[in-house]
Image (cartoon, rainbow, N blue to C red):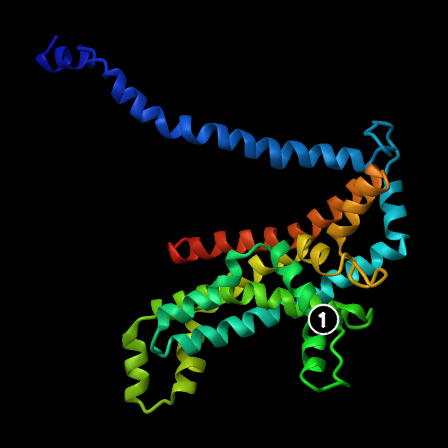
Amino acid sequence: MSNHDLILSVPAPARPWRQRLGSAMPLLVLGPSLVASFVYVFVFTGWTLYISLSNSSLLPTYGFVGLDNYASLWANRRWNIAYNNLFFFSGFYIVGSMAVGLLLAILIDQRVRGEAVWRTIFLYPLAVSFIVTGTVWSWLYNPTDGIQAMMRGLGWTNFSFALASDRHYAIYAVIITGVWQSSGFAMALFLAGLRSVDSDLVKAAQIDGASTFRIYRKVLLPTIAPIFLAVAVIQIQFAIKTFDLVAALTKGGPGISTTFPAIYVYDLMFQRGQIGEGAAAAIMMLAALAVVLVPYSFWVVWRRRKEAGHG
């Protein structure tokens, strides 16, 4: 046996227990969170799916009824209004918050004086929960105590601002409030994207005589195009899961004019005791999220592979 074989046959010294504990620490720290996330997302989702196919009413039961709950759900006028409200709200909410956020990001990107103060002011709504935002704005929309009362107290006796009290326009009150809440978030991402663009591109455009407007339209905004998609996807998730904002602002009214799927799910499960149909409504909300998140996930994977040279 050669000396080389003798060296290879000597067992490696055992690592100290502190070193072994240090190596296992990431798994020990992340393990409980990963298990809880798996149970919370996959196990509970599977259970909700099964309940949606059962004849559950006040308490969960496991008699299989197929798609009866889904048929009953889509035959309900209130659910159809809620789903239509979701798409209407999502369109204006996403476009509005992105437009306001982009405008604020461009203005701050001009290196204005007191930039840190302005960033804090515009980001402040993001630090406030939707339930607080809805409560405060409900006071502003209240005809007897809010903006209308203030303006009439100043002498404009014919001034009318009962936006949240009119069933035809209450959805716009929700949209305006949602845009106010989320535009600062969009601004932060857009501003980070604008500041990450290579300054040499901007200088080259300036040397060519391009105006500020043209630089943003032809150089900066196309460069941060992926951020637009990321912001839109995140805002869509906020829109689909909207509950606390509407619950505090309009409570789904007047009538059912601002009912959203999340409001309807809560009403079915905790007010009416129709757990099976409520689970079916929750699965439909999950399907709406999947329609957005699954294609986006595939796009992110494809883009990373392309950037890595595998596409």
Question: Which residue is more in the foreground, 75 or 242?
Answer: 242
For badge 1, the amino acid type reads Tyr
Q: Residue at point 86% right, 56% down?
A: 78
Indicate the position of residue 132 as horizontal and vertical percent values: 61, 56
Question: In what element is the residue under mark 1?
Answer: helix
Place residue 106 in its image quadrant: bottom left
Q: Residue furthest bottom?
A: 209
Residue 215 in the figure: left or right of residue 35: left
Quadrant where the N terminus is found in the figure: top left
Q: Which residue is mark 1?
A: 172
Q: Residue at point 55% right, 31% down?
A: 36
Question: Which residue is more in the foreground, 301 or 86?
Answer: 86
Indicate the position of residue 7 as horizontal and vertical percent values: 13, 14
Residue 26 in the figure: left or right of residue 186: left
Res 292 visible: yes
Residue 244 in the figure: left or right of residue 277: left
Q: Is residue 302 above or below residue 12?
A: below
Q: Is residue 72 above or below residue 182?
A: above
Question: Which residue is more in the foreground, 197 or 270?
Answer: 270
Q: Is residue 115 above or below residue 278?
A: below
Residue 47 in the figure: left or right of residue 228: right
Indicate the position of residue 33 as horizontal and vertical percent values: 50, 32
Quadrant where the C terminus is found in the figure: bottom left
Res 226 visible: no
Place residue 188 in its image quadrant: bottom left
Indicate the position of residue 243 as horizontal and vertical percent values: 69, 53
Tally of numbered discs = 1
Q: Badge 1: few (under 14), some or many (20 or more) residues near its Cα, within 10 Å?
A: some
Q: Residue furthest left?
A: 3
